Image (cartoon, grey):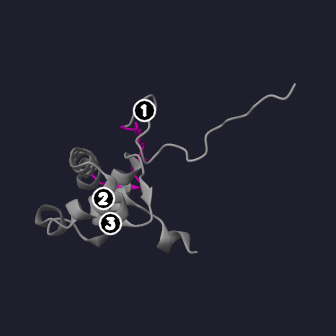
Amino acid sequence: MQLNVDVHNYMETLVGQVLIQRQYSEKYNHDQLADLACLALSQMRPVYIRHDVDFLSALPEERLVILKQQALAAIQAAEPMIIEDRRTMRDKDIPVILSQARFDHDNPLEWYEEPILKNNKKHKE
């Protein structure tokens, strides 16, 4: 098994679908698109899967729409960092980036996030 081949983050697919749109692919170069992808994915909860078709067949359409909206929102939030890229002025200023995750750990788990094995420890007395 090769982890990077057999398992992937489905959110990468959704972010990639947004970034291939003309408004991004024609505006930014390869390095900027890669930076946008990294910044966007860092804001999102990963969804690790093996096969897209299996995942999508069990995913309700409303949830897919929400995931796509989250991917677009994450890219739009990351875009100002690319536009105002301060890396060209490294000798003048040290960039400080404060990020805040866009997901709430108190939200209930999705069906694909629930542990397969439940913690059923029985105490022996």
Relative to 94, say whether 30 is above or below.
below
Is residue 94 part of the magenta span, yes or no? yes
Return the mark for residue 84: none
Answer left or right for 121 relative to 83: right
Between disc 1 and disc 2, whose residue precedes? 2
List x then y, in percent, for residue 90.
Answer: 41, 55
**Residue most toward the right?**
125
Residue indicated by mark 2: 56
Q: Residue at x 28, y 72 (%)?
A: 30
In space, the residues marked 1 and 3 are separated at their CA atoms by 24 Å
Three-letter amino acid code at the position of disc 3: Val
Q: Is residue 14 visible?
A: yes
**Residue neighbourhood size for the residue with mark 2, other residues' Cα within 10 Å, grouped as few (<14), some (14–19), many (≥20):** few
* Image depth: mark 1 or mark 2 in front: 2
CB atoms of marks 2 and 3 within 8 Å: yes
Residue range corresponding to the magenta coloring: 84-102
**Residue neighbourhood size for the residue with mark 3, other residues' Cα within 10 Å, grouped as few (<14), some (14–19), many (≥20):** few
In space, the residues marked 1 and 2 are separated at their CA atoms by 20 Å
